[in-house]
Image (cartoon, rainbow, N blue to C red):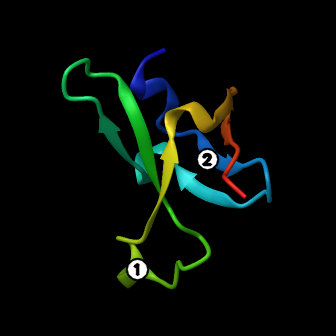
């Protein structure tokens, strides 16, 4: 799957149903040596209060992604 094919997908937390924008809104962290995706930084909806808080992110380990569907990326946050 290409990045351009998943960029428009909505990121949703399975645990509480919160929406964290689209993948284009997120930042990705890569392993320096391998180039593999280590984690994604998604906008934190609990502290999102307008455009001034756009640097407040929730760290989302790549292995917490449960499913990448046609329109949505589902992850399970830690308790």
SS type, badge 2: strand
Q: Is residue 21 above or below residue 38?
A: below
Q: Residue furthest front?
A: 79
Q: Secondary structure at mark 1?
A: helix
Image position, residue 28 (x, y; %): 35, 41
In the rendered structure, the answer to whether residue 74 lies left or right of residue 9 reads right
Which residue position is annotated with label 1? 53
Residue located farthest toward the left when viewing the structure as drawn: 33
Label 1 or label 2, whichever comes before in sequence order:
2
Question: Residue 41 bears which disc, if any?
Answer: none
Distance in Å between CA atoms under marks 1 and 2: 18 Å
Front-most of residues 16 and 4: 16
Q: Which x, y percent locates residue 20? A: 59, 58
Residue at coordinates 28% horizontally, 29% vertically from top-left? 31
On screen, residue 39 versus residue 73, left or right, reads: left
The residue that disc 2 covers is 11
Please identify the quadrant where the C terminus is shown.
bottom right
Label 2, residues with CA under 10 Å away: few <14, some 14-19, many ≥20: many
Looking at the image, which residue is at 62% across and 46% down?
Answer: 10
Residue 4, image x and y in percent? 41, 27
Q: How many dots with numbers?
A: 2
């Amino acid at each position: 799957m290409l990045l351009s094919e998943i960029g428009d997908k909505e990121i949703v937390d399975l645990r509480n149903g919160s929406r964290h924008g689209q993948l284009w809104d997120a930042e990705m962290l890569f392993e320096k040596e391998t180039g593999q995706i280590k984690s994604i930084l998604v906008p934190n909806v609990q502290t999102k209060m307008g455009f001034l808080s756009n640097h407040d992110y929730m760290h989302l380990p790549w292995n917490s992604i449960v499913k990448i569907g046609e329109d949505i990326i589902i992850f399970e946050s830690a308790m």
